[in-house]
Amino acid sequence: MPEPLPNPSFPVIPPPRDPAIQAALDGEHLRLLEIAFYIAGGVTVLFSCFFLIHFTMFLVFGLNPQMFANSAHGQNVAPPSPGLFLGFAAVIGVVILLGWIFGCLQIYAGRCLRQRRYLVFIFVIGALECVFIPWGTVIGVCAILVLNRSSVKALFI
């Protein structure tokens, strides 16, 4: 006679692992997370640098409004306001700085993973990482799942 199926109302609890195996798994998962944070931080900083082209362009246009003083098809056209370009340059500058700051925080979170320090900081950066779909979400969810283990929490100072 076949074995009856387990009752779905009761969760199936896996048997506990050998502590040595669990420690090896935790160490490997933390090492992979460390590498992922380093790569994500580097990519974030690099991606933020692409906006330097736009920042420079708007800054040049804002500081040299006479570039637009030429007439178009024989008609005198008023040049655009330099404040408009400087405003765009300011917004893009803030976006660049925020990207660099977050990228550096990601790299620092990877360093903290290596040193097994500042668990809450790494947890917060992992949660913020979830905003960057799809790769940031994968890294963030994996970080949250790994850092919530009691065996991993015991490794941190």
Image (cartoon, rainbow, N blue to C red):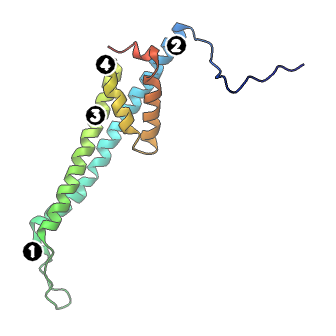
50 in relation to 143, above or below: below
Q: Which callout, 1 or 4, points at the residue further toward the start of the chain?
A: 1
Q: Which callout, 3 or 4, points at the residue further toward the start of the chain?
A: 3
| Residue type beneath disc 2 | Gln
Q: Which callout, 1 or 3, points at the residue further toward the start of the chain?
A: 1
Q: Residue at x 34, y 33 (%)?
A: 125
Do tag 3 and tag 2 residues touch (Cβ < 8 Å)?
Answer: no
| Residue type beneath disc 1 | Gln
Do tag 1 and tag 4 residues touch (Cβ < 8 Å)?
Answer: no
Q: Is residue 154 visible?
A: yes
Of marks 1 and 2, the one in the foreground: 2
Cα–Cα gap, marks 3 and 4 = 14 Å
Cα–Cα gap, marks 3 and 2 = 29 Å
Cα–Cα gap, marks 1 and 3 = 41 Å
Read off the residue under disc 4. Answer: 117
Of marks 1 and 4, the one in the foreground: 4
Do tag 2 and tag 4 residues touch (Cβ < 8 Å)?
Answer: no
Read off the residue under disc 1. Answer: 66
* Dot 2: element: helix
| Residue type beneath disc 4 | Arg
- Relative depth, front residue between 96 and 4: 4
| Residue 83 placement, left or right of 127 | left
Read off the residue under disc 3. Answer: 105
Read off the residue under disc 2. Answer: 22
